[in-house]
Amino acid sequence: MLAKQLSHLKPLLSILFVIVIWQLAHSLGLTNRNLFPGPWDVAKAAVKLFNDGVMMKDLKTSVSRAAVGFSLGATLGVLAGILTARVAIIRLAVYPFFNILRPIPAIALVPIAIVWFGIGEESKYFVIAYTVFLAVWLATHHGMEHVPETYIRASRSLGAPWWREFFEVVVPAAAPHIFAGLRFGAALAFLSLVAAELTGSSAGIGYRLEEARQYFQVDRMFVGLIQLGLLGAALDSFFVYLSKRVVHWETA
């Protein structure tokens, strides 16, 4: 019981250790204070942004964009992964094309997304969904394609119909890969979010980072980076917890 409680404290102790080293380096003048503010300066900037109502507005806007883009990309990624793994003609038709798309970074799509959808929310949803889609698709495809053959033979020897084989054998066997893809896709959603918000935005964490850069407000830039890190860590922890609850046979 004590060991479990201590394991939960490890992330907090790690963060505290980094803050202490950071503050020590700042106090001793080991860093350029104009380029690398101390923890107290960043904390004061965060409090000011919060009191001005800017922080919560940006947080709400960015989380909403990431949630919509992730939902679209993850849903389409799972469906596409199932089809490319289980339907030969679809695999032949689109698998090479998806592999060509994978190396294209999200930020490279921002100009064409603006041309296609304008500077509104749709272009941001598109950039985020594109990035998430490819990550979830690849993980789902891999999981569906590499279901152990012994599982398939066992289900067929027992006379299981195709739909039962799919839902009770293939999907459970591929579920760990799918959840790994969703977890990776969630992290990519916040990476692509910044790229999507750098252009044509009036609110959001990415927009605030760019605004702070223009006015050389490094402390506010650090606030944005910390927000992104905390959001990503929280979402990652959620998917780890969800995976353990849903894919319990894998962790047993």
Image: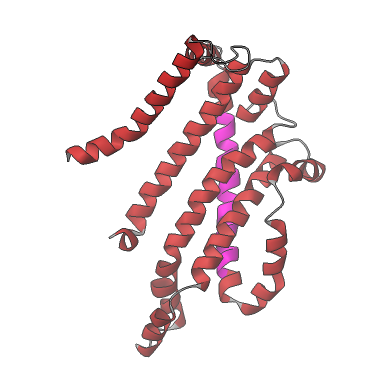
Residue nearer the viewer, 81 or 16: 16
Q: Position of residue 68 (x, y in %)?
A: 58, 43
Q: Is residue 79 visible?
A: yes
Side (left or right) of 17 relative to 133: left
Q: Position of residue 25 (x, y in %)?
A: 49, 16
Quarter of the image with the N terminus is top left
Q: Residue at x 60, y 38 (%)?
A: 65
Side (left or right) of 113 relative to 46: right
Point out the stretch of residues depicted in magenta: 60-82
Kindly indicate the quadrant of the structure image that contains residue 223.
top right
Kindly indicate the quadrant of the structure image that contains residue 85.
bottom right
Quarter of the image with the C terminus is bottom left
Residue nearer the viewer, 31 or 69: 31
Does 163 appear above or below 172? Answer: below
Q: Residue at x 36, y 47 (%)?
A: 241
Side (left or right) of 28 relative to 168: right
Q: Is residue 57 visible?
A: no
Does 97 appear above or below 51? Answer: below
Q: Position of residue 191 (x, y in %)?
A: 60, 40
Kindly indicate the quadrant of the structure image that contains residue 91.
bottom right
The mark total stands at 0
Q: Residue at x 58, y 25 (%)?
A: 58
